[in-house]
Amino acid sequence: MEVQQTAARASAKELTLRGILLGGAITLLFTAANVYLGLKVGLTFATSIPAAVISMAILRGFKDSTIWENNIVQTVASAAGTLAAIIFVLPGLVMIGWWQGFPYWTTAAITGTGGILGVLFSVPLRRALVVDTPLPYPEGHAAAEVLRVGSGSREGAEESAKGLSVLVWNALASVGFAVLTQTRLIVGEAAVWFRTGSGATGISGGLSFALLGVGHLVGLSVGMAMFLGLVIGWWALLPILTAQSPMAGDVGAWAGAIFSRDVRFFGAGVIGVAAVWTLLRIAGPVIGGVRSAMAASRARHAGEALAIEEQDLPITAVALGALAMMVPIAVLLWSVIAGGPLAGSELVLIAGAVVFVVVFGLLIAAVCGYMAGLIGASNSPVSGIGILSVVAASLMLVGLFGRDSGAETSSALVAYALIVTGIVFGVATISNDNLQDLKTGQLVGATPWKQQVALVIGVVFGSLVIPPVLDLLNTAFGFAGMPGAGANALPAPQAALISALAKGVLGGNLNWTMIGWGAAAGVAFIVLDEVLGKAGRLRLPPLAVGIGIYLPMSAILPVVIGSVIGKVYDGWAEKRADPEFALRMGVLTATGMIVGESLWGVAFAGIVAASGSDAPLALVGDGFEVPALVGGTALFFALVAFLYGRTRKLVG
């Protein structure tokens, strides 16, 4: 009987062409949405659960579809969607003027090589960090529950239909509101700046369904930590720093300049210390996990049979594949150097970069995988890893070339540091995601090696989609800080910070004072978080505090509000007859809000690019601002109440 069950499982559909194509189609939507959202607010969303819901709704029409095939679809889509986080680095090349746009194959190569290395580097960690570990993997467990219910009985079909309904309705509402903001009949964002004695500060808020949904997903702990950062950055630091540099004239321009010049670097110091603290905390468990994985590999070579659920890609293939990836990486780096100011230094630069990618890449694969298991891929501080990567890469180049290289050479070194960081960041983003996916696979009994192949396919899909989306958004809006950036330029906050760090380290003029004060504050936030944790109180993750300081208030405030609304909803959901279903419906409610506005952002970019106008849908002028603010705020919260009320009604 057991042999028959094993044979039936082995022959069940899993890695299929239709599953790969469906995953690719979902990739087009979610990757584009994540690129836009990341450039706008510096946050991306996990795509596993919505991809699983869409997959089940479509594949249910095929009699031979299986839970494992649905798992492959969400694996492909989530890998590609997560890879969109590369936009935390690459726009920096446009901001510094090295690129005028995003060359397709170069952008795809940076994204793809790093992503594939991320898959390969994390294969040996699966047993250590997924199987033999108490790590919770919150999103992996949630996606597994969605797949289990959706692949089951008629009740599962009904839940899948309800989930898809929530996703579509909320996406449409989010799109509708975003369209209205572009007509200017309602406002999407408002700010008031004012003086505080000899200093200045302000209050700024955005009416964004995408940010509200992000707040729901990250949870109250992260939301409150970001609010603490907002209070410190805007209502403590900014008034003090502006008072030290008084200026007459436009209060908004004055305070905004101080925020960008000083407050953001204070936030960067907090983020850097929080990332280092995370590395120190997980070093022991990661080393222990790798030892466990090596012991399992020795047992396999001794002839022990492995169940389907334990069949990874052969470690020899993984090692050879990782070595083979060094060839396209070396060719890519050579193409960047050849004929430019760094010509003649190809050997030392490429050798140094390859060693850096291997050593640093292996380290962050373990770190990011552990962090994703601990707090979830959405909450994992990948941007903090990017900050550490660019500082380390820049210091490596300072060690090789010094700081007195001339303006042209320095600019080329900054670009080179960003490209190397982009490759390493691809490793970080994918290892942050795919161990979460492999946990889902473990829980539903998937075949690891098939899922690992699907992850590589997802990386390829994402690498092909990301460059044209980036180019479209660059053409339509541009990025804040780049030459000729307009009023509607996308902030791309992490890319701006990472490029500024590279320029500062290589040029010797980094704002070390504010980074140092931020680092000291980061230590205090770490102590506070640990004390709260031991007291059993709501924790305030230091990284989230740093993000709250670094990002504009208009981006943070909606996230904070969303985290409170999400907490209220989750409290209601936990009292339902089926709390897991109710909680999943809440996740889909928030995800629909994010997907709708984000996809509209990409579509609107196309309208702007085609029309040549930065406000092609505007129906009214500036004189309509007051009614647009009042009416827009009322409509926004009325829609939020309606959408959450509809979800609660569906849950029952």
Image: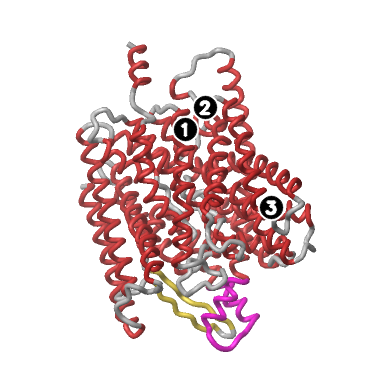
Q: Which residue type carries mark 1? A: Val
Give the secondary structure at mark 3.
loop
Give the number of the mark in front: 3 or 2: 3
Quadrant of the image containing the N terminus: top left
Answer whether labels 3 and 1 touch (C-beta < 8 Å).
no
Residue at (34% x, 46% y) in the render: 50
Does residue 315 sit above or below 376 in this rendering?
above
**Distance between the alpha carbons at the discs numbered 2 and 1:** 8 Å
Res. 590 in view: yes
Q: Which residue is mark 1?
A: 453
User: To which quarter of the image does residue 484 belong?
Assistant: bottom right
Q: Quadrant of residue 624?
A: bottom left
Q: Residue 134 in the image: x percent, y percent?
A: 50, 34
Going by the image, does 405 lie left or right of 18?
right
Residue 338: numbered disc: 3
Q: For this rendering, which residue is in front, 111 or 570?
A: 111
Can residue 516 be seen in this snapshot? no
Of residue 556 and residue 464, the one placed in the foreground of this image is: 464
Q: Are marks 2 and 1 in contact (CB under 8 Å)?
A: yes
Residue farthest front in this picture: 339
Looking at the image, is mark 3 or mark 2 earlier in the sequence?
2
Residue 222: % across, % down: 47, 55
Q: Which residue is mark 2?
A: 313
Marks 3/1: CA distance? 34 Å
Instruction: Point out the frontmost of discs 3 and 1.
Output: 3
Report the disc number at residue 210.
none
